[in-house]
Amino acid sequence: MTWWHAVIIFVAGVWAGGINAVVGSGTLVTFPVLVALGYPPVTATTSNAVGLAPGTISGAYGYRAELAGYWPQVVRFAVASFFGAIGGTVLLLTLPRDAFETIVPVLVGLAVVLVIVQPKVSKWVQKRREVNGGEHKPGPLLFGLLFVIGIYGGYFTAAQGVMMMAVMGMLLSESMQRLNGVKNALSAVVNVVAGVIYACTAPVNWAVIGLLALGSTLGGQLGAKIGRKLSPTVLRGVIVVIGLAAVVQLLLK
């Protein structure tokens, strides 16, 4: 690895860590960079999963204030993400890449649509809560969707944050900032699980992993500071823009 390759990978890690903390899709930065630098797609995918895991932990830590008092619920969600991530890694290690990636743009596009319509759905849900006199609590549908997103995240990771924000925004009563904190925590679970499995069973490049880990950890802190200051409308707009960019990039691959 040349010194300028190392600089590019580190900068991409910082960028990816920041994007992941704000909304997700950091893999759509680092994956093309690694492939362009000559790394095989599978090695790029597995090294991404391992290298970006510290960044997701960093982003979750940056949102610790928004998650105060909500950690018991986060742990419950994390169980679904944990087992989903295991399923996703099994798919990557056993199935041809095309078998799953053909539906990735559709999934990300659907998530973007859900984020766009989420405010109207939330108003409808709020009216139902007022009529019923109670809060909208997590149910089997949410846990099932988080499990499925965990499978996707364990397989490819890109834009899993967009999907999480979409489904949680529609099915939970919490603020956008708290949901973003939950998203960071669950993304950390998925990336750590996938990273550990890939590090033990799949081809990885440890030099790449080290650079991505350093860069994404720094980026996670920077992204958390920026993301926490965004209004719900701006945060939703960022999610939509990055989600659309993810769809375009995936279609052009």
Image (cartoon, helix red, strand yellow):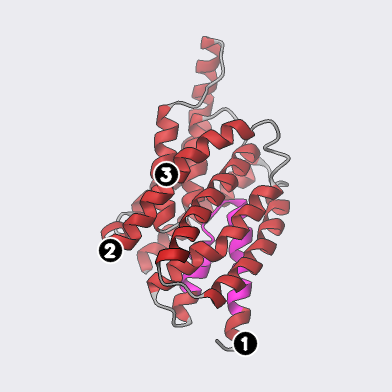
Q: Residue at x 46, y 56 (%)?
A: 194
The one nearer the camera, 235 or 208, is 208
Q: Residue at x 52, y 23 (%)?
A: 137
- Image-quadrant location for residue 180: top right
Decide: few, some or many residues near mark 2? Use Cα within 10 Å; few <14, some 14-19, many ≥20. few
> Relative to residue 41, is residue 242 depicted above or below?
above
Determine contact: label 3, label 1, CB under 8 Å.
no
- Identify the residue position indicated by label 2 in the image: 98
Q: CA distance from mark 1 to mark 2?
A: 33 Å
Q: Of the residues shown, which amino acid type is indicated by label 3?
A: Phe
- Identify the residue position indicated by label 3 in the image: 83
Q: Residue at x 67, y 37 (%)?
A: 67
Residue 197's disc number: none
- Residue 139 position in % (x across, y down): 45, 26
Q: Residue at x 63, y 46 (%)?
A: 234
The mark that comes first in sequence, 1 or 2, is: 1
* Residue farthest to the bottom, as pictured: 2
- Identify the residue position indicated by label 1 in the image: 3
52 in the magenta segment: no
Q: Nearer the viewer, mark 1 or mark 2?
A: 1
Determine contact: label 1, label 2, CB under 8 Å.
no
Decide: few, some or many residues near mark 1? Use Cα within 10 Å; few <14, some 14-19, many ≥20. few
